[in-house]
Image: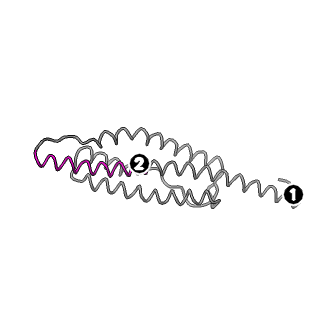
Amino acid sequence: MINGPAPTPIGSESALGTALQAVATGAPNAGQAADAFAQQVQQQVQQSAQIKAAAQSGGFTVDPDTASEMIAAYNFALDEWTAGQTDIQLIIRNYPLGTSPQAKVTASWNLQAAQKLQAAYNQLGTVYQDQVDAYRSMITNYQENEANVSDAVRRAGGHA
């Protein structure tokens, strides 16, 4: 049972896919797609930082079984994120599109969009790691709360 804010959803897969495809193919909407992905990731960065801070300050708890499932999900996302770094590196290269002035401008523009995408993608890894850290803190909080309740019941003459 989760006691506190809802967990951050894993990923912005559709925005990432759209941005990757647009940047990799040099589509006219590549910059917009990279910006849209970056905005979604920035929201997740803020949410995950708040959740991590709340968890580390004892602000909420999650039972260990649920937290373990969430940690496994975020670790899976981290594994996928690490594997995706190769795709990002492939599209970040400055592919020469020819020697014409238009080709040079397009190649430069594509590179700028790819760099935005890479920066946002790197932040996504931070989001996933923050969530793993937060859920580990939530387990500790839960166990400490459980121990405190057991101690209080014992001191009051009950059994825990």
Dominant SS of magenta comes to: helix
Which residue corresponds to mark 2?
122
Query: Residue 148 versus residue 7: which sits nearer the camera?
Result: 148
Task: Decide if residue 61 is on the left or right side of residue 115.
Answer: right
Q: Which is nearer the eye, 134 or 77?
A: 134
Q: Which residues are magenta?
A: 100-123
Q: Position of residue 10 (x, y in %)?
A: 47, 50
Which of the numbered marks, if any, corresponds to residue 65?
A: none
Quadrant in the rendering for residue 6: bottom right
- Say if the magenta span includes residue 107: yes
Badge 2 amino acid: Asn
Q: Secondary structure at mark 2?
A: helix
| Mark count | 2
Q: Nearer the viewer, residue 29 or 113?
A: 113
Give the quarter of the image for residue 150. Answer: bottom right
Q: Secondary structure at mark 1?
A: loop
Q: Amino acid at mark 1?
A: Gly
- Taking the spot 67% from the left edge, 55% from the top edge, the residue there is 141
Q: Observer-nearest residue: 123 or 21?
A: 123
Q: Position of residue 145 (x, y in %)?
A: 72, 57
The x, y position of residue 78, in whole percent, is 48, 43
Q: Which residue is mark 1?
A: 158
Q: Residue at x 41, y 38 (%)?
A: 83
The mark nearer the N terminus, 2 or 1, is: 2
Q: In the rendered view, how is the structure colored?
A: one colour
